[in-house]
Image (cartoon, helix red, strand yellow):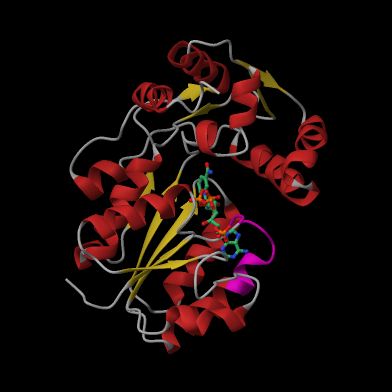
């Protein structure tokens, strides 16, 4: 086990928070990387990077808002150069399944020559309880431009387990893990399982990308609403309608089911507000 800290970018977010907790529980020193950490890390200001990378050998790389934004490849190029200069020996990159822009960034990380692991995740189950969709669940309507596509929602706890394995065990170096849950659901089916677990009415409201942007701009801002609509157009066109075995290959066990996620989220009280 290394004595230098493992850098966890996005350490207050859905994946990073769980990863940092797991590492800390195992006695591994963690350096949190985000705008609210000390020292602060800002993806859009490379002058903040050297202090955060100093003394680190391994890093979990969680870009924000998404590897598919046009600025991401340039930022990832610069970041991998800075990581190499800092002596980083392993990068574990969170990526998105079915996103051409994210694959471009994965290739930049691989081309850096730093040993790396790519975690190509499908839609997070926890988007319904920890992200901007939570308000919709509480209001009884999940508004998305996702049509009737089926999605193999992945539990963020599985992503965190795989990330911790990849961060702490060199046998994963070079791996590309496609991380999905064990079952595909349409958004309507997901809403119905959430409703059953939460014991409240929740429906899926399919909308056009334009209507989605109108609804979400006041909540997340115009650029993220527009980007999310574009991303939905890309990933909900049927390309992700398949299961992958990344969780099983990385951990030797199957992924958690969406129904178990729903029960756990309901027990936590997040849908009782
Ligand atoms: N949601 C999905 O279904 C899904 C699926 C596949 C892949 N992904 C990928 O997951 C990533 C997001 O991960 P997540 O859901 O774990 O995070 P998250 O819950 O969205 O939280 C974002 C994290 O990034 C930090 N952050 C935000 N803006 C930042 C900036 N400008 N510079 C530095 N740090 C910043 C935040 O902390 P501070 O506020 O303190 O900075 C926070 O820790 C994205 O790359 C996305 O493409 C998501």
Q: Residue 196 location, x and y as percent?
A: 46, 11
> What is the quadrant of residue 92 in the picture?
bottom left
Q: Nearer the viewer, residue 121 or 196?
A: 196
Q: Quadrant of the C terminus?
A: top right
Q: Residue 111 location, x and y as percent?
A: 45, 75
Q: Quadrant of ligand 1?
A: bottom right
Q: Quadrant of the N terminus?
A: bottom left
Q: Which residues are magenta?
A: 65-75
Q: Which residue: 27% across, 59% down?
A: 23
Residue 57 magenta: no
- Check the image and report above or below for 93 versus 250: below
Q: Residue 209 location, x and y as percent?
A: 76, 34
- Check the image and report above or below for 68 versus 178: below
- Check the image and report above or below for 86 versus 58: below
Is 16 left, or right, of 43 in this rendering? left
Residue 70 magenta: yes
Q: Residue 42 location, x and y as percent?
A: 60, 70
Which residue ends up furthest to the bottom in the rendered image?
85
Q: Which residue: 68% across, 19% down?
A: 205
Q: Which residue: 50% across, 84% down?
A: 50
Q: Main secondary structure of the magenta part?
A: loop
Counting the numbered discs, the total is 0
Q: Which residue: 50% across, 38% down?
A: 123
Let me know if residue 148 appears in the view.
no
């Amino acid at each position: 086990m290394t004595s230098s800290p493992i850098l966890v970018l996005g350490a207050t977010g859905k994946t990073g928070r769980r990863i940092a907790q797991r590492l800390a529980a195992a006695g591994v020193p963690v350096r949190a990387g985000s705008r609210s950490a000390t020292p602060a890390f800002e993806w859009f200001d490379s002058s903040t990077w050297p202090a955060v990378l100093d003394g680190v050998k391994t890093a979990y790389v969680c870009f924000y808002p998404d590897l598919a934004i046009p600025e991401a490849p340039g930022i990832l190029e610069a970041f991998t150069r800075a990581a190499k200069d800092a002596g980083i020996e392993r990068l574990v990159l969170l990526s998105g399944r079915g996103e051409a822009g994210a694959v471009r960034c994965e290739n930049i990380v691989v081309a850096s020559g730093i040993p790396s692991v790519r975690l190509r995740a499908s839609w997070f189950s926890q988007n319904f309880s920890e992200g901007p969709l939570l308000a919709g669940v509480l209001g009884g309507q999940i508004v998305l431009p996702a049509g009737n596509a089926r999605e193999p929602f992945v539990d963020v706890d599985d992503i965190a387990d795989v990330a911790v394995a990849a961060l702490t065990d060199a046998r994963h170096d070079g791996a590309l893990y496609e991380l999905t849950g064990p079952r595909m659901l349409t958004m309507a089916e997901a809403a119905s399982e959430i409703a059953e677990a939460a014991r409240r009415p929740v429906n899926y409201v399919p909308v056009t990308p334009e209507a989605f942007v109108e609804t979400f701009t006041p909540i997340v801002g115009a650029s993220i609403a527009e980007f999310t609509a574009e991303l939905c157009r890309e990933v909900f066109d049927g390309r992700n309608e398949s299961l992958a075995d990344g969780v099983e290959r990385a951990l030797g066990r199957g992924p958690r089911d969406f129904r178990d996620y729903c029960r756990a989220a309901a027990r936590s009280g997040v849908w009782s507000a």
